[in-house]
Image (tube, grey):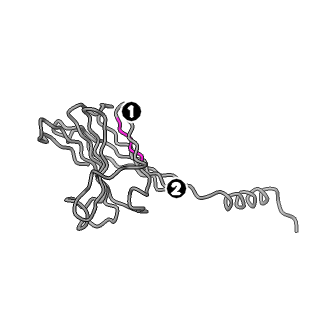
């Protein structure tokens, strides 16, 4: 039997495909209308990607390539069991809060009673780029969830009160 050269290439590629682990392919991007923020940080896009090491990256983009203002806070709420009746007030088992006043962040995890911000985050990293905040977290800190729901809030604060909010 004679195999055409093209057939050999296809067979070789199929064999190589069996040797290389499948890349994580759950990358998604979600949009939120610009200008619906009432003065709060205006979230316009949240892009979510993951890798083969179990890291999940959230890139939260703000309208007009604006930076997170000093009176602004971004909240990333993650419902790791996808059940709104468990977890915190909104059903979240994980919350990450980014403070624009000092570029710090807090990580909280549901402990059965409340979202506990005293938990030490081992893998959470937050970075700032022009017009975006990036959050990297390993799925081990997302209760090893393979799927989850999430939402973000951009809040504007004055003293101890939220004066404007953009829910995305």
Task: Please rate how many residues cluster around mark 1, counting C-alpha atoms within 10 Å: few if below 14, some from 14 to 19, many from 20.
Answer: some
- The picture quadrant where one finds residue 91 is bottom left
- The picture quadrant where one finds residue 19 is bottom right
Residue at the spot 30% in from the left edge and 31% down from the top edge = 67
Tell whether 134 sits left or right of 32.
right
Residue at the spot 43% in from the left edge and 57% down from the top edge = 140
Residue at the spot 42% in from the left edge and 52% down from the top edge = 28
**Magenta stretch, main secondary structure class:** strand
Give how far across and how far down residue 152 sits, in percent.
Answer: 27, 48
62 and 35: which is toward the camera:
62
Give how far across and how far down residue 121 sits, in percent.
Answer: 37, 49
Tell whether 122 sits left or right of 83.
right
Q: Residue 129: which numbered mark, if any?
A: 1
Give how far across and how far down residue 83 sits, in percent.
Answer: 28, 67
Label 2, secondary structure: give it. loop
The region drawn magenta spans 132-136
Q: Residue 52: which numbered mark, if any?
A: none
What is the total number of numbered labels drawn onto the structure image?
2
Q: Residue 24: which numbered mark, if any?
A: 2
Label 1, secondary structure: give it. strand
Q: Let me know if residue 119 is in the magenta part.
A: no
104 and 57: which is toward the camera:
104
Q: Earlier in the sequence, mark 1 or mark 2?
A: 2
Give how far across and how far down residue 21 sits, in percent.
Answer: 61, 58
Tell whether 120 sits left or right of 92.
right
Label 1 – label 2 distance at C-alpha: 24 Å
């Amino acid at each position: 039997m004679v195999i055409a050269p093209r057939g050999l290439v296809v067979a070789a590629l199929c064999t190589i495909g069996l040797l290389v682990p499948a890349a994580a392919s759950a990358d998604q991007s979600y949009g939120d209308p610009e200008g619906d923020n009432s003065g709060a940080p205006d979230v316009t896009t949240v892009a979510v990607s993951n890798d083969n090491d179990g890291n999940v990256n959230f890139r939260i983009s703000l309208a007009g390539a604006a930076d997170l203002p000093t009176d602004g806070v971004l909240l990333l709420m993650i419902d790791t069991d996808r059940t709104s009746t468990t977890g915190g007030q909104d059903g979240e088992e994980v919350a990450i809060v980014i403070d624009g006043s000092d570029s710090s962040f807090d990580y909280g995890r549901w402990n059965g009673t409340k979202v506990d911000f005293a938990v030490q985050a081992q893998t959470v990293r937050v970075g700032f780029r022009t017009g975006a905040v990036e959050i990297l977290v390993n799925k081990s800190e997302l209760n090893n969830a393979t799927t989850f729901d999430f939402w973000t809030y951009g809040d504007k604060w004055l003293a101890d009160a939220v004066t404007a909010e953009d829910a995305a």
